Amino acid sequence: MRRYPPYASVSHSFGPGSVTPAVKAIIWANVGVYVLTWLVPALTQLLGLIPQAVFGRLWIWQPVTYMFVHGGLSHILFNMLGVWMFGVELERLWGTRFFVRFYAVAGLGAAATTLVWALLPLGSSAQIYYAVTIGASGALYGLLLAFAVYYPDRPILMFLLFPIPAKYFVLIIGAIAFMASAGSGGGGIAHTAHLGGLVAAYLYLKGARSLVAEIKYRYLRWKMHRLRKRFDVHAGGRRDDWNRRVH
């Protein structure tokens, strides 16, 4: 029998492991846009989400492009770190196609919430109407919610200090986003977009899971019907109904 030293089977890794295709593409796209806006700062106004520009100038690309614009190195660093930490496991679980759809829905939901909120008669609405919303945080909050749904007891560092289960982490940040959105402050943080990302992700996950369950149910019914026809199975009637065949 061949023997190996004890350390030969020991390996260490940080985070979820190697980057998956969609997560890699998202990170590179964000880095590319960050470099462009660093070289040409005026692009931030063009690509960021400004409700006044969307409604008044019909800059309808902004609900998509704002997800790739960041305001500083720490901003893009923390967002892309979150996309990697939570997105990799979700993409492996769902597959690349569903992951991309989910990420887009969460980001677009965050944009839609910001646009709608900007039209409401609230104290913070006027400020949001003319403000520039940038960053992948709305989509990232959607990833956090999905991660909490599939891995509810996985620990996440709250404020990078102490671990709490993912399900409680999402509840806390959701409450913070809701209360901050209703207020007039925000400290430059797009809490409305965060809330929108959470809500859009929840609704999409709930709808998608129901749709998958319905498809499976319909497929099983079709399969059973096909088997009945194949083996000439008929529903049984009364015992004296000799014209029916029961198998």
Image (cartoon, rainbow, N blue to C red):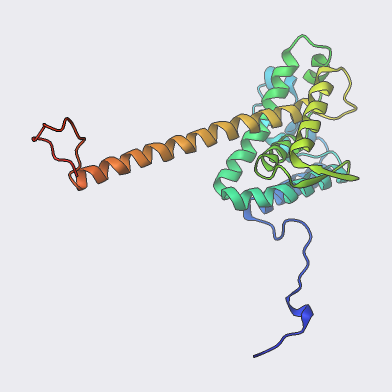
Image position, residue 155 (x, y; %): 79, 47
Horizontally, residue 204 falls left or right of residue 34, namely left
Q: Total marks drawn?
A: 0
Q: Position of residue 160 (x, y in %)?
A: 88, 45
The residue located at (64%, 27%) in the rendering is 60
Residues 146 and 132: in front is: 146
Relative to the observer, which residue lies in front, 112 or 175? 175
Quarter where residue 55 is shown: top right
**Front in this rendered view, residue 165 or 245:** 245
**Does the image show residue 43?**
no
Residue 80 picture location, percent across and down: 77, 47
Residue drawn at x 60%, y 45% as measured from the top left: 99
Residue at left offset 9%, top offset 35%: 242
Closer to the camera in the image, 151 or 105: 151
* Position of 104 relative to 27 (above/below): above
- Judged from this view, the residue extending furthest toward the bottom is 1
Instruction: Give the residue displayed 72% in from the left and 60% down from the top.
Output: 17
